[in-house]
């Protein structure tokens, strides 16, 4: 509104302005001439009408500022993950193909064996590590090929002694080269590992020893079959065992002794039913390493002769020995003969009177134990 002019009210499209002293708009009420109190024709002050418009404008500005802040933050978040792709311009991703053929070019395994020495320790497999490749490159399987099927073993007519002690180590306890089959309710000698050195099969129900029970056991040194029901043993059951040193057979039902190997050092056949006829003639003469011969509590009628010079202990108590030859222990033709090793002779529990044979002991370091009256 220009100075000194008035606005026409009630005229559509606005109002026309006239000079202060000009003609008034027709049909429109106007403020009285010369009125300067700021009121409209209705009498309300003009300032009161303008206040709501001012508040609306201020609110509009505040809302616009609030909308602008999240928009700027959103633009920043979008721009943040942008990466400079210029670093990857020289990387050929179209021809990148990692296969077993190109693996050696990507990962250098040339010095892997130098970093990990498995010469004396078994390799430990850890999660997330590569297994050491074999020293022989030809051992690696080729890509696209399958491993050849293993050839079946040729059929054999004779039973094969199982490796690792099977099935004897399922029935018994195998510790190293020793096999423990005590009180296992066995009725026969089980198949043994080929490297068995000591066998303990006591307190079972074994009734016989067959010729093939110990075939091929060249390292077997001790056989202990105490407290079984053995009444028969094949003549060749022990003869072909080159390393056998101790044969322990007490508390059985034997009526005869089989042939023994020359490597035998200790024979214990106490508490059996062996008569003198159950011993082979001169059964112990060639056993040059025999040191302990225990045949007590049997049915012997005389002292078995000849006895090897290596013998140290002879137990024949509780038999049926009634007489003795003067050459049983000493050579009656050589009075200088002395048996220094044979210090333990037991003849107690026999019906023999040892005082009747004084010339039978002159070569011994001590007299036998028995009845002298």
Image (spheres, rainbow, N blue to C red):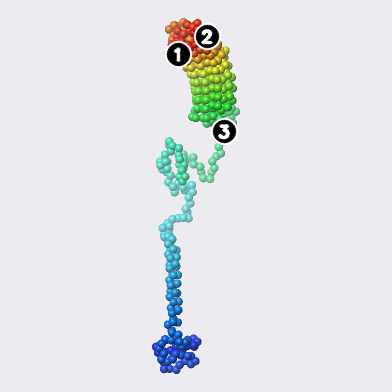
Q: Which residue is mark 3?
A: 153
Image quadrant where one finds the N terminus = bottom left
Q: Which residue is mark 2?
A: 352
State the CA–CA distance, disc 3 to disc 2. 64 Å
Q: Quadrant of residue 44?
A: bottom left
Q: In the image shown, does 200 or 356 lie closer to the viewer? A: 356
State the CA–CA distance, disc 1 to disc 3. 57 Å
Front label number (3 vs 2): 2
The tag earlier along the polypeptide, 3 or 2, is 3
The label on residue 343 is: 1
- Check disc 1 and report its element: helix, strand or loop: loop
- Check disc 3 and report its element: helix, strand or loop: loop
Query: Image height check: is 136 above or below 369?
Result: below
Q: In the image shown, does 331 or 227 lie closer to the viewer? A: 227
Residue 137: percent from the left, percent from the top? Answer: 47, 41
Front label number (2 vs 1): 2
Residue 206: percent from the left, percent from the top? Answer: 58, 23
Q: In the image shown, does 165 or 39 lie closer to the viewer? A: 39
Residue at the spot x=44%, y=82% of the render? Answer: 48
Sort mark 3 into few (<14), some (14-19) or many (20+) by Cα contacts within 10 Å: few
């Amino acid at each position: 509104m220009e100075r000194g002019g008035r606005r026409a009210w009630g005229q559509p499209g606005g109002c026309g302005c006239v000079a202060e002293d000009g003609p008034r708009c027709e049909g429109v009420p106007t403020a009285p001439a010369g009125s300067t109190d700021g009121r409209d024709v209705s009498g309300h002050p003009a300032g009161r009408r303008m206040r709501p418009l001012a508040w609306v404008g201020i609110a509009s500005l505040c809302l616009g500022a609030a909308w602008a802040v999240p928009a700027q933050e959103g633009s920043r978040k979008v721009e943040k993950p942008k990466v400079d792709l210029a670093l990857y311009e020289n990387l050929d991703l179209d021809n990148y193909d990692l296969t077993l053929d190109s693996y050696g070019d990507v990962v250098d395994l040339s010095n892997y064996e130098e970093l990990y020495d498995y010469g004396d320790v078994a390799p430990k497999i850890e999660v997330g590590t590569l297994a050491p490749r074999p020293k022989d490159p030809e051992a690696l399987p080729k890509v696209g090929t399958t491993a050849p099927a293993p050839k079946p073993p040729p059929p054999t007519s004779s039973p094969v002694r199982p490796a690792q002690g099977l099935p004897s180590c399922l029935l018994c306890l195998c510790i190293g080269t020793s096999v423990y089959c005590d009180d296992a309710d066995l009725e026969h000698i089980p198949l043994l590992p080929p490297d068995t050195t000591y066998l303990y099969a006591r307190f079972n129900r074994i009734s016989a020893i067959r010729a093939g029970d110990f075939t091929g056991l060249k390292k077997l040194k001790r056989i202990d079959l105490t407290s079984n029901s053995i009444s028969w043993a094949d003549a060749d059951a022990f003869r072909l065992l080159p390393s056998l040193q101790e044969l322990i057979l007490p508390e059985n039902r034997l009526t005869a002794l089989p042939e023994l190997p020359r490597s035998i050092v200790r024979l214990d056949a106490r508490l059996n039913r062996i008569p003198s006829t159950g011993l082979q003639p001169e059964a112990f003469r060639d056993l040059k390493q025999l040191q302990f011969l225990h045949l007590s509590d049997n049915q012997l009628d005389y002292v078995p002769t000849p006895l090897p010079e290596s013998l140290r202990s002879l137990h024949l108590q509780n038999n049926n020995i009634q007489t003795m030859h003067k050459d049983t222990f000493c050579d009656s033709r050589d009075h200088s003969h002395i048996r220094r090793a044979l210090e333990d002779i037991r003849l107690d529990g026999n019906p023999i009177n040892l005082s009747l044979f004084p010339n039978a002991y002159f070569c011994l370091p001590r007299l036998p134990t028995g009845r002298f009256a």
